[in-house]
Image (tube, grey):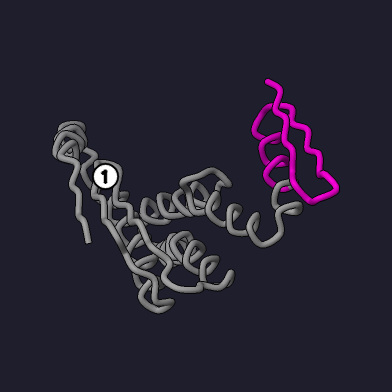
């Protein structure tokens, strides 16, 4: 397993310390670490292999190799449990430490956006493999909401042809 550390993390720590907000940065980073550790725990249970860990200024990321024949549900559970961890932390601290609650709620929502490489984008990608026409329509609708006109055509063979106009 490969581990990479981005040393810009020291700069971020110094900046947040200088502006008196080091506790918010630490809450943010620890929340992301818990999010990724949950992914690692699920990877262990579904027999996937963590191939690399990246520790950066904005948190932590992992790369996973799904070994053998992984079913659709295992992959969806793997991707959903990270944001679910953030929502559980947000709910747990809602009445005591509001900063932890707000940061984790925002992280959970952000990670569920249907954009790669976020968990939401990976979920859409897996749904796309499972049923290409339904997920392509969902992705196009989300793109339309985020700003832009998109047209989708589904051919007779079930292939999706997507056209974006700015």
Residue at 71% of width from left, 54% of height from top?
Answer: 132
Label 1 packing within 10 angstroms: few (<14), some (14-19), many (20+): some
| Residue 149 on the magenta segment | yes
Instruction: Please state if 135 lies on the left or on the right of 77 as rendered.
Output: right
Instruction: Report the front residue among 75 and 30.
Output: 75
The quadrant in which the C terminus is found is top right
Residue beneath label 1, please?
Answer: 25
- Residue 17: percent from the left, percent from the top? 16, 37
Q: Is residue 28 above or below residue 148?
A: below
Label 1's element? helix
Looking at the rendering, which quadrant does residue 72 occupy? Answer: bottom right
Q: Position of residue 144 (x, y in %)?
A: 71, 34
Is residue 34 within the magenta segment?
A: no
Q: Is residue 61 above or below residue 164?
A: below
Say which quadrant the N terminus sits in.
bottom left
Please state if 99 lies on the left or on the right of 3 as rendered. right
Report the span colored magenta.
138-166
| Label total for image | 1
The spot of residue 5 in percent (x, y) is 18, 47
Residue occupying the point 66% across, 36% down:
143
Outermost right residue: 156
User: Among all residues in the image, which is located at the extreme top?
Assistant: 166
Q: Nearer the viewer, residue 106 or 132?
A: 132
Seen as rendered, the residue at the extreme bottom is 45
């Amino acid at each position: 397993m490969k581990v990479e550390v981005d040393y810009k993390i020291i700069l971020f720590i110094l900046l947040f310390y200088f502006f008196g907000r080091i506790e918010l940065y630490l809450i943010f980073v620890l929340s992301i670490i818990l999010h990724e550790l949950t992914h690692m725990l699920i990877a262990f249970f579904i027999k996937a292999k963590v191939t690399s860990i990246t520790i950066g200024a904005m948190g932590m990321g992992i790369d996973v190799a799904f070994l053998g024949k992984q079913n659709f549900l295992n992959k969806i559970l793997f991707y959903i449990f990270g944001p679910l961890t953030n929502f559980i932390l947000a709910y747990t601290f809602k009445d005591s430490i509001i900063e932890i609650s707000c940061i984790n709620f925002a992280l959970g929502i952000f990670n569920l956006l249907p954009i790669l490489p976020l968990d939401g984008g990976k979920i859409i990608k897996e749904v796309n493999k499972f049923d290409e026409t339904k997920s392509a329509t969902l992705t196009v609708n989300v793109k339309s909401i985020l700003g832009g006109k998109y047209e989708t055509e589904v051919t007779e063979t079930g292939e999706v042809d997507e056209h974006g106009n700015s």
